[in-house]
Amino acid sequence: MNQDWLANIARYIVYFILVRVSRPAAVMAYDALHNNAVLDFSRLVEKQRNTIVLFVVSSLVLYYSKLKLFGEDFVSLFVAYLLLHRDENNRKPSTVTYGVGMACSYFEGYLNHVIPSDGYRFVGFQENISNYENYHSIVFPVRRLFVVITKSLFCPPDLKFFNRENRPDLPSLDACESLPRITKDVAGVKNREYKNSAYMIRRPDGPPVYLAVECATPIHTLYNVVKNRQLYSEIDNIDKKEVIDDFTRTLTNVIDKSEDCRGKCELVYFDTDSDKCLAEVLLDKIRAIEPNFENISRERD
């Protein structure tokens, strides 16, 4: 009697776990197929470790009890679940994830002010670079704003922090004078100023390469939030990687959809623990966008 009772509990645990994960699993699969999202199985297993252990133990109980894993009542239970949640399947989420909100705020609150021309006081990011080139007699081989997204969330005041010390054989970053300031009236703030940073990549085997690059400020904000998590109990258990993935995916999609910003902004993911320094990663990105960038520099000269 006790053995049958235990086996029935184990069976229904298996049922409820399978039914509960069916919908999010379908959403993840759809996201991977249609939004090119990467399925991180190791992180998924880590988050659902207790559920997986419970599922395995319950399955073993059924196995040693010589009972079938699925009975006729499983189909009835699954159909009942679908009927009860039919409205949720057609309803879009009522809440916005932290990463999605960061991306939307960053695009509307910053990129949309510094990239496109406003047809009045600001000529646009690429024209701003062109004027900067003419004034300083230099060349930007790729006229895009490179936005660095760091895996560690840490964003230093100066990107030379990511240079490798005592490695003269590697390229390095040096800050230059910033691009001309952008002044706009925004949300009641008169003459609000925006500006983008210009950097020089010094190379041991070639002339310097100039580019506009900066860290994504929402990532810097997230770093401070995590550091001061005692102030933000609502997000105490935040998954940093999930937030960064949501932020990067959403921002990429928004930029691609925007006629004003498409092809003018490039996201660069940087892992501080990788073998490459940031200057190398940026050079690789420039080379991927414009393989002939060395000759472009000479032609514009």
Image (tube, grey):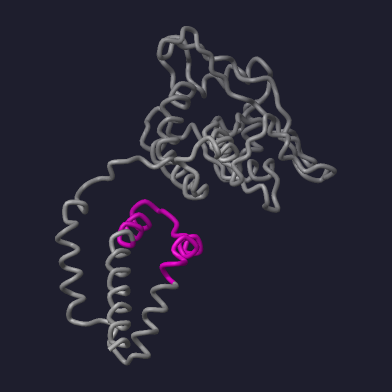
**Coordinates of residue 264 in the picture (x, y in percent):** 48, 31
Q: Is residue 298 visible?
A: no
Answer above or below: position of 131 versus 285: above
Q: Magenta residues, as a range?
A: 25-52
The residue located at (62%, 34%) in the rendering is 296
Q: Residue furthest front?
A: 2
**Coordinates of residue 101 in the picture (x, y in percent):** 40, 36
**Coordinates of residue 54 in the picture (x, y in percent):** 41, 73
Q: Residue furthest bottom?
A: 66
Answer above or below: position of 269 versus 196: below
The picture quadrant where one finds residue 135 is top right
The residue located at (82%, 45%) in the rendering is 167
In the rendered structure, the answer to whether residue 199 lies left or right of residue 85 reads right
The picture quadrant where one finds residue 279 is top right
Q: Nearer the viewer, residue 79 or 114?
A: 79
In the rendered structure, the answer to whether residue 15 lies left or right of residue 178 reads left
Magenta stretch: residue 37 in it? Answer: yes
